Image: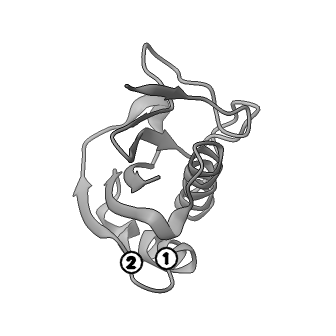
Amino acid sequence: MKEIIFTENAPKPIGPYSQAIKVGGFIFISGQLGIDSQGNLLSNTKEQTRQVLNNLKSILYSAGSNLEKVVKITIFFTQKDDFSIINEVYSEFFTKEPPARSAVCVAALPKDALVEIEAIAQV
């Protein structure tokens, strides 16, 4: 049985999707933007990446999991020169045994965000 995950500690979805779905021992987290819980998009790649990862943390916690149980991350970003900034912040959150990861430079993201990250984690 699937369970819809929602927390007030992360931004509300901006479209017809759930923050996350828990099913079969896994949590599938929708792409998160660098938006704080008040709906404000932060101004630069470093701040947005940190906020995205904090949003992921909040969603994981509300689903009974944490960053150490993340098995796969997908990062979407719009500025190829910002990849090292994203990696710098990312490595603060995943210090040991980082999850599998893909990173894709895209033309644009919703709300003109610079970074979007989705994740899959174990419960």
Q: Foreground: 111 or 69?
A: 69
Q: In the displayed structure, would residue 43 be above or below residue 45?
A: above
Q: CA distance from mark 2 to mark 1?
A: 5 Å
Q: In the displayed structure, would residue 62 be above or below residue 16?
A: below
**Residue 32: where, in percent of width, then height?**
48, 42
* Circle 1 residue: 94
Which residue in the rendered view is the most extreme toward the top? 16
Which residue in the rendered view is the most extreme toward the right? 38
**Residue 23: where, in percent of width, then height?**
37, 36
Label 1 environment density (alpha carbons within 10 Å; few <14, some 14–19, many ≥20): some
Residue drawn 49% across and 30% down? 111
The quarter of the picture where the N terminus appears is top left
SS class, disc 1: loop
* Amino acid type at image mark 1: Phe
> Residue 26, labelled with which disc?
none
SS class, disc 2: loop
Q: Foreground: 117 or 95?
A: 95
Residue drawn 49% across and 80% down? 91
Q: In the displayed structure, would residue 50 be above or below residue 115?
A: below
How many marks overall?
A: 2
Q: In the displayed structure, would residue 18 be above or below residue 97?
A: above
* Amino acid type at image mark 2: Pro
* Circle 2 residue: 98
Q: Is residue 73 left or right of residue 6?
A: left
**Residue 72: where, in percent of width, then height?**
31, 60
